[in-house]
Amino acid sequence: MENDDFVNMDRNNRRFSFNYKQILIFLVMMVSLYFFIPSNKNQDCDYEDCMRNRRVEGVVYRKFIDKSDHSVPKVVVRHLGGNQLDTLNFLMEKSGVFDVLNESDTIFKSINSLEFYKVVNDSLSLVGVISTNCKEDSR
């Protein structure tokens, strides 16, 4: 009888040990995935920095959703006083500036600013301020 109890205890210990190993392997895999999968926080901050360092003075030549590039909202701007075209990517932008802009709008954005303006009745009107999910502590 005692021998049967010992065998049952041994089976239970092996079963517990097997479950313990599975749980440990699962936890190690989840932790490693957490550290190896990139976060969008840095992408949001990079996008915001890129837009902040960009100067825009021109006419909206084309506004579209680029389906060949994962449905990224884009605006093509023809610079004032020239034929140079510049494409603005509004993928990470959360405040709706893209939605307010229309083709043939004259728009301005100065360097070190995230504010977009457009000409309305010969004066500048604030269209919106670029905002993303970037937090200061994730820079």
Image (spheres, grey):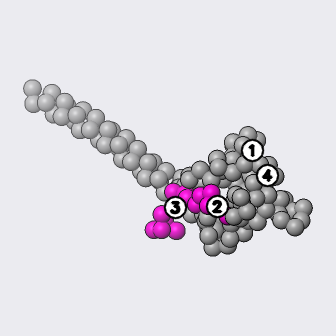
In the figure, is residue 1 to the left or right of 28?
left
Q: Are marks 3 and 2 in contact (CB under 8 Å)?
A: no
From this viewpoint, is residue 10 visible? Answer: yes
Q: Amino acid at mark 3?
A: Cys
| Total numbered labels placed on residues in the image | 4
* First reached walking from the N terminus: tag 3 or tag 4: 4
* First reached walking from the N terminus: tag 3 or tag 2: 2
To which residue does mark 3 refer? Answer: 134
How far apart are labels 2 and 4 at the CA level?
Answer: 15 Å
Front residue of 43/37: it is 43
Quarter of the image for residue 46 reads bottom right
Quarter of the image for residue 93 reads bottom right
| Residue drawn at point x = 62 percent, y = 53 percent | 97
Please state the extent of the stretch shown in magenta in the rendering: 124-139
Q: Is residue 83 above or below residue 113?
A: above
Q: Secondary structure at mark 3?
A: loop
How far apart are labels 3 and 2 at the CA level?
Answer: 26 Å
Q: Secondary structure at mark 1?
A: strand
